[in-house]
Amino acid sequence: MENVRVRFAPSPTGPLHIGGVRTALFNYLFAKKHNGTFVLRIEDTDQTRYVANAENYITESLEWCGIPFDEGPGKNEKFGPYRQSERKDIYKKYADALVASNQAYYAFDTAEELTDIRNQAEANKTVFVYNNVSRETLNNSINLSKEEVENKLTAGEKYVIRFKTPKDQKLILDDMIRGEITIDTNTLDDKILFKSDGMPTYHLANIVDDHLMEISHVIRGEEWLPSLPLHSLLYEAFGWIAPKFAHLPLILKPVGKGKLSKRDGDKLGFPVFPLDYINKETNEVSTGYKEEGYFNDAFINMLALLGWNPGTEQELFSLEELCKEFSIERVSKSGAKFSIDKTKWFNQQYMMSTDVSKIVIEFKILNKDLISDYDDDYIYKVITSVRERATFTKDLWELSDYYFVNPTSYDEKTARKQWKEDTSAIMTAVLETIKNVTEFNSKNIEGKVKEYITANELGFGKVLQPLRLSIVGAMKGPDLFEIIEMIGKENAIKRIENAIQKLG
């Protein structure tokens, strides 16, 4: 495949939803699979919904996800500018060209006039649509003389330029995911392409920019599928070769019906944005996957499998593997149900496979005041011993606190069950046994303690469970004797003495 160029074209109207991130990801994977270019274009023609910090949020999100753009605002601006608001002088001539070729027209209908027409249609139990039938009777350049149109334009009357949808045509369109789609043009309305304020609508700007930026494939969300007929007609009207289109399936709610929304995340307690987002108007903070503790590669791995099937049983992929294996033909037509449990599973798998040194860095940041006396080698060993039980780095402290802090309290339920009348005497004997271990490693400690148990004909649980309670403070943690070796003889002695004193 030659000269593949794809684009991710979000609107800066708020935080980037994970559905948008997945669209960016699939574009990125397709580009890298075919040695192509991944373009970021900011589609900010709707200035009424523009949010000042949204563009930075988009670029920071892509960077954190590990899918940075090759071309875009401030980067390799071969076809710049990449913000549509900075390109507005480009679009007017294309709108005028369509008017000149009788494929678009000026419409001077006021909002009040259109409202009256809609109300009248509703009273007649019909629906008004501005289309190839109704346009013949409305306030537009189809029905006005050339002189009347020029007078209105000269007088500065507000207008829009609408596309003149052809009558009685059957469009046969091709989608890389959905296959052949047939559309009757009589079902389409005459969309607005340009407004008298000098700004194009999404439809015109999108087509012109894709053409000028030499976009070869348009991979976008399913919500844009209804725009495909108009966009195809616009390419034809301009005499341009259209890119290939692929419309991605929706990411569905966990219950399986409807598009996943922020409300679902708020209700069920999971993020729907890659990074934390602060609403400047309400100061509401929406939690992101990064701040929630997810690894960026786990997040990306999860998103890749929402709607794409590799055709094998493999579920864990590095980004490099995804770039190699991704195929647009294996993207599903039907929606992909989001699962927070599966998302956590991905993170847990990455917790097990990620270089422990990276986890050490984050663990130290999260717990700097509690572990400042310990070196990286010790922390590395601690994390290695407990990470298989963790989903997030923030879970590691609760799983490993006893490696760093001597317990001052003990799990009450376990203490009532395990600490009998004779337990203090048994623990005193175990204490002496541990004091007498010369080469203090887990193997020797285990051997000596088990010798004591066997020699005194005691049950292993009768000794080892209260010993774990003494060392850890609860019935948790990996191999008990490895813990004792890690904390050292002096700490082990202190902990057993303290337990005897408090529980005896």
Image (cartoon, rainbow, N blue to C red):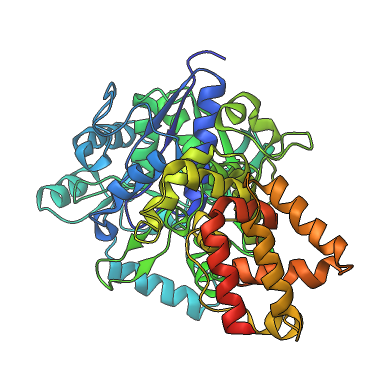
How many numbered circles does the render carry?
A: 0
In depth, the one of 151 and 365 nearer the eye is 365
Query: Percent position (x, y) of residue 462?
Result: 80, 72
Query: Percent position (x, y) of residue 258?
Result: 62, 64
Residue drawn at x 65%, y 51% is 437
Residue at the farthest top position: 2
Horizontal relation, residue 455 to residue 378: left or right: right
Quarter of the figure with residue 338: bottom right
In depth, the one of 111 and 313 nearer the eye is 313
Quarter of the figure with residue 471: bottom right
Query: Percent position (x, y) of residue 116?
Result: 36, 74
Horizontal relation, residue 395 to residue 234: left or right: right
Residue drawn at x 31%, y 69% is 113
Residue at the farthest left position: 155
- Quadrant containing the C terminus in the rendered view: bottom right
Residue drawn at x 62%, y 60% is 340
- Whether residue 249 can be seen here: no
Residue drawn at x 87%, y 61% is 454
Is 34 above or below relative to 277? Answer: above
In depth, the one of 133 and 423 nearer the eye is 423
Query: Percent position (x, y) of residue 404?
Result: 48, 59
Quarter of the figure with residue 327: top right
- Whether residue 144 can be seen here: yes
Is 236 above or below relative to 11? Answer: above
Horizontal relation, residue 220 to residue 254: left or right: left
